[in-house]
Image (cartoon, rainbow, N blue to C red):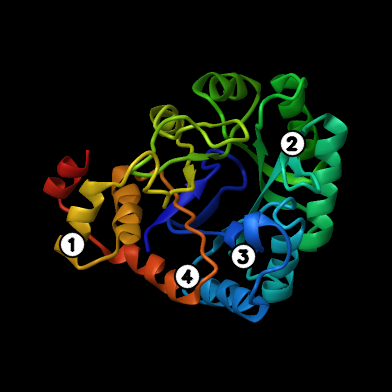
Amino acid sequence: MSTITIAQHSAQPLTVSRLGYGTMRLTGPEIWGEPADRPQALEILKIAVASGVNFIDTADYYGEDVTNRLIAEALYPYPADLVICTKVGATRRPDKSWVPFNTPENLRTSIENNLRTLQQEQVQLVHLRLIGHGGVPFEEQLGAMFEMQREGKIQHVGLSNVSRADLEAGLKMGEIATVENMYGHGQRTTINLGHGDSQGGEEVLDLCEQHGIPLIPYFSLVNSLPKADSQIAEIAKKYGASEAQINLAWLLHKSPWILPIPGTSSLAHLRENLKAAEIQLTAENMAFLG
């Protein structure tokens, strides 16, 4: 697998393999509760890392707190090269709705919770996730993140679900290590998924490239939004691969600054996703895919 460097201009850059793993699917239905098959969830984490994955994406509101506890149970003490990335700025209600949790006090509570459940003294990378601004100015939220970075609780600060204007504003305040937005071949721009807008990666990719900021796509395998992706299906047929594999291969070929984090609760699908890194799309394939 090729590699990508996070916070390359900082004193503590992090180099990881260009195919990570997103843990959201390890939870129960609707991203709530314990996994249906806990032993398999733990095995997925172990095999992912054993297969060369050293970037894992999580959040304390997955479950809630389910994925963090699974990561610690499966992988602690952590390998020296493993980067665990978490998110703050949101929480879940008992009705499973997603709501902002983004005052400076909220953000500090979330960071302390992540440190506790992940059994870390410092979180290597934290995304400030925007679910609306919830009445709290963006600058106040991000300022609180940089304050905790100065305190040593956070090593690197990233942004998630941000517009181009948000990213431009963030870059004026300090170093933004990474951006995590919705992005895949079938869904590249902003869309409303029912709990607010999910910002698209296409709108910030060129800005990320200019500043050497890895773009981390979430929901990268949602090919059915807004419609079936016939172009991906055609290339998949030519390669004898799955549509998910071609979508991941397209992301890897689209830009050297993209770091996909496909998630799954199936060991078979994990192995399938990892094989996507071996697919070499031609210039003709990429032109056809757009």
Q: Secondary structure at mark 1?
A: helix
Sequence order check, earlier mark of 2 and 1: 2
Residue type pointed to by label 2: Val
Q: Residue furthest front?
A: 95
Q: Is residue 30 visible?
A: yes
Question: At x 64% / y 54%, what residue is drawn?
Answer: 30
Spatial distance from mark 1 to mark 3, Cα to Cα?
29 Å
Residue annotated with mark 1: 237
Sequence order check, earlier mark of 3 and 2: 3
Residue annotated with mark 4: 52
Q: Secondary structure at mark 4?
A: loop
Quarter of the image for the C terminus: give it: top left
Residue annotated with mark 3: 26
Spatial distance from mark 4 to mark 3, Cα to Cα?
19 Å
Sequence order check, earlier mark of 1 and 3: 3
Spatial distance from mark 2 to mark 1, Cα to Cα?
41 Å
Sequence order check, earlier mark of 4 and 3: 3
**Contact? badges 1 and 3 (CB < 8 Å):** no
Residue 33 picture location, percent across and down: 73, 62
Q: Which mark is residue 99?
A: 2
Image height of 245 relative to 133, above or below: below
Q: Which mark's residue is nearer the viewer, 2 or 4?
A: 2
Q: Is residue 277 found left or right of 171 in the rendered image?
A: left
